[in-house]
Amino acid sequence: MNNTVAWEYPWLQNVLESLKRSHQGSALAHAYILGGTRGLGKKQIALEIAAFLTCVKPSTEGPCGACKSCQLNTTANHPDVLYLAPKEPGKALTVDQIRRLSDYVHVSSHAGGARVAVLAEADKMNSSASNALLKTLEEPHESTYLFLVTDSPGLLSPTIRSRCQRLTLPTPSLEVSLAWMRTGKGNEFDEQHAINCLKASGGSPLLAMEMLLDESLPNRQALEREFIACLTGKSTPESLLAALSKSEPVTAIEQILSTTALCAKLMLLSTTEANETSGDSGGLAPSPIWSQFIERVSTSDAGENARRRALLGNRLVRLYDEIEKARRQLYSPSNPNSKLLLESLCWLTSRALK
């Protein structure tokens, strides 16, 4: 568990300040769902709040970093902070892990203060684990706080969502992301390369920084180009399948999921709004193939153009739902055939806008 100091992420300041004020005003909710796209720092913000709540001498800037509680949090050994995550990548939280949480919330604080539990990838639970978690949420204990971290809050059961406060982390502007990435890279910072990484990550700075460090951008760009080409009829499902097969299935599906979301957003906007969005985001729109497709389907009649874009936008939303369904299947304990899933997605992609 990496307890990164989320106070150093400028795009999280408002959320952190809001949670801190709620705590100081004795208005902090028993349970929160921390949502937002990958690479925004959801896990980090949950762990930072856990450190703040268990700190002996918290300041206006956050946990002091010097007390015994802070030292224990730094090494992920604080007895009053429980962190639960799937035991293996692509796996789900188990009912045994959630039962451990249930036992944990019934034990008194070791330090006499708050107790905090953080559930990473909380949407990846089977029905037994969800039911066990619901029982815990229905019996809140004083000074015990739960943070459910998820990229897809909608996959949590309605009853769980109804018992938690919802916090959605914002995607920062291009300027904020670049400034943060520039600080991290120093003299080695290449702004255009950083912009390309932000584009491939859907605007998520932490994911973009990973791309800068592991040099995975070319592979991601190649996959995006192939996906857009298949989507717009410029390539075949077989070519897309070959590109998807070069990455781990979950990673590949998550990338085309974010690209589909961006394409749908731009399609459903008016022509003027889409141009403004692309300009404001520093060119974070999809590849030129997508721009050419938009020009090809556009008409001089404004009303007909709006109807056409709405139709295609809705088809992209349906494709997004199918990709999301495949992602959930990959995370399920039933061990689905990933090759068949990818083949089906490639065929659906090729037909989505026809």
Image (cartoon, helix red, strand yellow):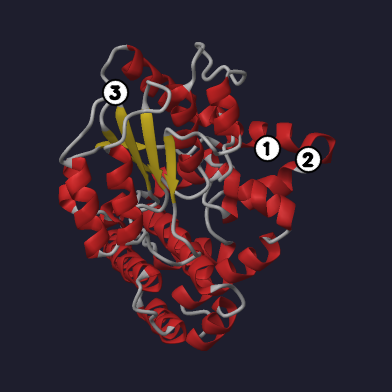
Mark 2, Cα crowd under 10 Å, few <14 / some 14-19 / many 20+, is some
Residue 85, position in %: x, y? 44, 53
Q: Residue at x 36, y 62 (%)?
A: 299
**237 or 88: which is nearer to us?**
88
State the residue position of label 2: 189
Task: Estimate the spatial distance between the alpha carbons at disc 3 and disc 1, rounded to whole Å.
Answer: 32 Å
Instruction: Give residue 163's quadrant in the image.
Output: top left
Q: Are circles 2 and 1 on residues that touch, CB within 8 Å? A: yes
Q: Amino acid at mark 2?
A: Phe
Which numbered disc, 3 or 2, marks the residue that appears first in the sequence? 3
| SS class, disc 2 | loop
Disc 3 target residue: 28
The residue carrying mark 1 is: 181
Q: Secondary structure at mark 3?
A: loop
Disc 1 secondary structure class:
helix
Q: CA distance from mark 2 to mark 1?
A: 8 Å
Residue at 50% in and 30% down: 48
**Location of residue 61 in the rendering, given as x and y in whole percent from the top left corner:** 53, 15
Q: CA distance from mark 3 to mark 2?
A: 39 Å
Q: Which sits in the foreground, 222 or 63?
A: 63
Q: Amino acid at mark 3?
A: Leu
Image position of 310 with respect to 179: above or below: below
Query: Going from the N terminus, do you reach mark 3 or mark 1 first?
Result: 3
Q: Name the amino acid type tagged 1.
A: Met
Image quarter (top left, top right, bottom left or bottom right) of the C terminus:
bottom left
Q: Can you give x and y, in whole percent of width and height, for residue 333 in the image?
A: 35, 73
